[in-house]
Amino acid sequence: MDARYPIGHFESNGAITSAQRAAWIEELEQLPSQLAAAVNDLSQEQLNTPYREEGWTVRQVIHHIADSHMNSYTRFKLALTEDRPTIRPYYEDRWAELADTTTAPIALSLVLIKALHERWVILLKTMSEADYARTFFHPESEKTIALDYNLGVYAWHGKHHLAHITKLAERMGW
Ligand code: NI
């Protein structure tokens, strides 16, 4: 198994049903408490352990989720209020090397992710079928992305990074 992709890549084929969306929203809703449970008992040394060789530390993974999901939330709001806006890509690997990500207490991002996901879920639960069909343009991939697909991507993204932490803890016998 590739330690980088413990749950595989995101896959979505064909139409996305409202039941599928509801399941993804539920996953986003549960992520903050699952993350908190995964890191609650870890020591500073454990938090500073890379989840794989050459990989981010557990601390960086937690702060990265906050960075990434703040960007995603903004993209949802842009797409809901503008016509196919071009979103702003960023270098997530460089963000992850900044001091707030390498050294800040993870409690800060756990609170941030919890509050952010609560707002995100309120928004997601009130979005109509037409809202989920709204899109943004990603200038790097040059793809037009619909919000229902992007919901799936970020439900996957949360589970993907959660699995980095839980698999590491399993391997290390923590
Ligand atoms: Ni990521």
Image (spheres, rainbow, N blue to C red):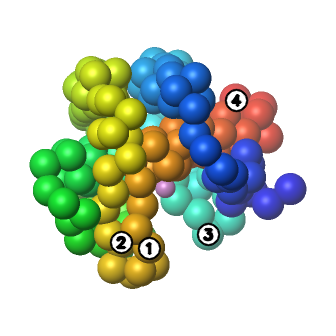
Query: Mark 2 vs mark 1: which is more N-terminal?
Result: 2
Residue extending farthest right: 1
Estimate the spatial distance between the alpha carbons at disc 4 and disc 1, rounded to whole Å: 41 Å
Mark nearer the viewer, 3 or 4: 3
Can you tell which quarter of the image residue 126 is in? top left
The percent coordinates of residue 165 (x first, y second) are 61, 40
Q: Are marks 2 and 4 in contact (CB under 8 Å)?
A: no
Crowd band around label 2 with a 10 angstrom C-alpha radius: few (<14), some (14–19), many (20+): some
Please state if 30 lies on the left or on the right of 127 as rendered.
right
Mark nearer the viewer, 4 or 1: 1
The disc label shown at residue 54, or none:
3
Mark nearer the viewer, 2 or 4: 2
Residue extending farthest left: 81
The residue where tag 2 is placed is 138
Q: Residue at x 57, y 50 (%)?
A: 49
Estimate the spatial distance between the alpha carbons at disc 2 and disc 1, rounded to whole Å: 5 Å
Give the residue type that dot 4 points to: Trp
Q: Are marks 3 and 2 in contact (CB under 8 Å)?
A: no
